[in-house]
Amino acid sequence: MELSLKNYMEDMVMAKMPSVMKQMNICECEQCRMDILAYVLNKMPPKYVVTQKGSMYAKLALLQSQFDVDILSNLSQAAAMVKKNPRHKEE
C-alpha cells in the first residue's frame, strides 16, 4: 500500500480559482495563476491528509463548505492584487 501526503486546501482553492478569475477578468497566464494560488494558500490553513494513492478525500468534502467563504474572499483579494500589479511580461 503506497501512501500519499496531500494539502487538500490546494485542491479546494484550485477548484474555485477559474470561476473567480473569469468573473474578475483576470489574465489566465501561468504567472498570474501561480501568484494568485500562492497568495491564497499562504492565507489559508493547510489541510494535509494521508491517503492511499488514488483514493478520494470523501471525509474532507464535509470540511469544504466551512472554508468556501474564506477561499472565495481570499481569491478575490489575490485576483484584485494580481490584476493591479501583474508580474507577467507584456506581449
Image: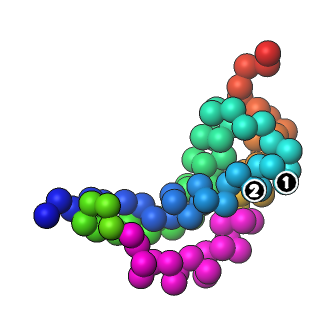
Q: Is residue 44 left or right of residue 77?
A: left
- Name the foreground residue: 30 vs 57: 57
The segment highlighted magenta reads 56-73
Q: Which of the image's four quarters has the N terminus?
A: bottom left
The spot of residue 16 in percent (x, y) is 67, 60
User: Marks 1/2: CA distance?
Assistant: 6 Å
Q: Is residue 42 left or right of residue 16?
A: left
Disc 1 packing (10 Å; few <14; some 14–19; many ≥20) = few
Who's the residue at 17% across and 59% down the image?
A: 2
Taking 86 as reference, is 64 above or below it?
below
Local SS, label 2: helix
Who's the residue at 61% across and 75% down the image?
A: 67
Residue 23: give its label.
1
Residue beneath label 2, please? 19
Q: Is residue 80 visible?
A: no
Taking 86 as reference, is 4 above or below it?
below
- Name the foreground residue: 60 vs 70: 60
Local SS, label 1: helix
Residue 80: give its label.
none
Who's the residue at 85% across and 50% down the image?
A: 24
Q: Is residue 60 visible?
A: yes
Type of amino acid at the residue the image marks with label 1: Gln
The reply to whether callout 1 and callout 2 are in contact (CB within 8 Å) is yes
Type of amino acid at the residue the image marks with label 2: Ser
